[in-house]
Amino acid sequence: MAKPIPKVGSRRSGRSSARKSARRIPKGVIHVQASFNNTIVTVTDVRGRVISWSSAGTCGFKVSLRKKSVNPFPLNTCSGFCCTPKEMVGLSAGEKHFIQGGIAQDLRLDGRKRLTYRPIYVETGIIPQAHGSARVRLGATDVIASVKAELGKPSALQPDKAKIAIYVDCSPTAAPMFEGRGGEELSTELSVALERCLLGGKSGAGAGIDPTSLVVVEGKVCWDLYIDGLVISSDGNLLDALAAAIKAALSNTGIPKVDVAAEATGDEQPEVNISDEEFLQFDTTGIPVIVTLTKVGKHYIVDATSEEESQMSSAVSISVNRKGHVCGLTKRGGAGLDPSIILDMISVAKHVSEQLINKLDSEIAAAEASEE
Amino acid sequence: MSKTEYVSPEGLRLDGRRPMEMRQLRAEIGTVAKANGSAVFEMGNTKVIAAVYGPREVQNRSQLINDHALVRCEYSMANFSTGDRMRKPKGDRRSTEISLVIRQTMEACILTHLMPRSQIDIFVQVLQADGGTRSACINAATLALADAGIPMRDIVTSCSAGYLNSTPLLDLNYIEDSAGGPDVTVGILPKLDKVTLLQMDAKLPVDIFENVMGLAVEGCKAIANYIREVLLENTKQLEFRRGL
């Protein structure tokens, strides 16, 4: 079962550790009994005599798999965002301590400081069938974003605004738990968070992409944008990677120029000619980046790996644009945060986002140059 | 002629290939860092990623098999993989069928009896579909399984061939695939010289079928050579990194 399997080394009871030194067993058998409710690991010698045992319950995992799906606070136990494969959650006590201690000393597992991103790699134009596409890699996290534009009709309520939608899909290649419908919850969570951070409110105010710029004829014809994200490999910090990929894909996007052939009267749809040669580029300078600050222990870190995400108490995702304005904010994770800490986090995120935007912009420019 | 010419009088196809020519192949091993084995395989514009997890503990106890490994496969297409954007790609009949085909093909070559009571998951994700996704997926899955170090009888390679304008064509692209002609997909074990997968739609006289199938088998062999080269190159790299 996908229940976290406690490492045998992390015995809690003094009983077994006292005996450990007394007997030395060159060969043994580890029996794992995993059910929906608990996982019990028993170490025996080759003849089946029990040497020691441990169970997930004694290690402090109290929520059963079954319960988790109906748990009203699913973020408490295993935050959806951190999509950490469950076997990752089963870090040994020593590993957990090592991660937390490292973060407290401003030196993380991979040698980064708390506020350093992993190197970011951008490739653009990887999906020729889309109007724009990009692949972003952040360490072992690997995401693809594509932009497709379709001619549509603006809604009657907002005739001067085009429809922009973001869909994220978690491929089972990223983790076996995304198989079938397993990735749906996380996909929806990511899509909604991205829409909130990048597209502004219902009115479209504060959006990174100006929905009025996509309208061809007011109330009649507009370009509907479909932004698709695909998670290929996940090692934490999916939201930041996806936002960066979407930004890169949009700056790679060329939308065909449309000429309105004849002005239609009344309710008729006007005829349009789609140009094959002229493309409109987006102004992507206003598109924000998302900086996720993950709180582990007393400190918070950016760009957490999945191991670090499994230790988080809460996380705040802040989207900041080039001007330093906060465009959207999502807090997740069970533990409460002091309001002053949130304000502190926002100012840190603002500072970090400057470097991130500059890095991303130069990577995008380099990717575009190498594509040509 | 009102019909579209799929082969011009000069003997060139719509994308400029000759009838017996394959699209450009490209493969890369180890693209998904977290998987036990992974590979990207491209045939022209068709691009797929395969990831293998396992052999590992069986997730669903009722599926446990006592004397050999359980092989599972899931095929999924990205929303942006096709020309028109797809709405809801998960779990339709086509992907279920392809998952099954890939699973059966790979199961035939994995030495499952060496890994009893365990499970091997193969996930293939289509990034771009331009005909021949089935073949590309099988080729990618082979590479990923090899990368994961799973014992196999032989590598499996697959290629498709068709028959249009009275010419046998190798490795159909999307336009040729949807032209309505026959489409023969073959999967072979190249060293053992055995066919493990054979699918065809539409009708075809027997003698022509033989030609078309022969062509597809030739294609499979060419792919097998390429895959072997890629694997060898990968092994050399690993060797180099270990300082041997």
Image (cartoon, coloured by chain):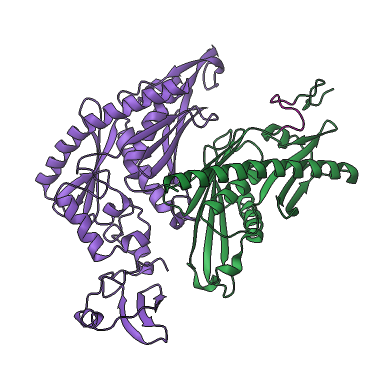
Q: Is residue A320 above or below residue B200?
A: above
Quadrant of image for the N terminus of chain A: bottom left
Left or right: where does residue A93 sit relative to residue B75?
left
Tell me: A144 left or right of B109: left
In the depicted view, which residue is nearer to us: B44 or B4? B44
User: What secondary structure is the stretch in magenta mostly built from?
Assistant: loop
Name the tint of chain B in the rendering.
Answer: green
Residue A289 on image: x %, y %: 29, 33
Which residue appears at 27% of the width and 43% of the height? A303
Chain letter for purple, please: A
View extreme (front): residue: B244
The residue at 28%/83% (across/down) is A23
Q: Quadrant of residue B221?
A: top right
On whether residue B10 falls in the magenta region, the answer is no
Q: Residue at x 32, y 30 (%)?
A: A204
Residue B220 percent coordinates (x, y) = 71, 44
Left or right: A207 in relation to B100:
left
| Boundaries of the magenta span | B13-21
Q: How many marks?
A: 0
Q: Is residue A115 visible?
A: yes
Residue B18 locus on image (x, y percent): 75, 27
* Image location of residue A206, percent across then percent down: 28, 29
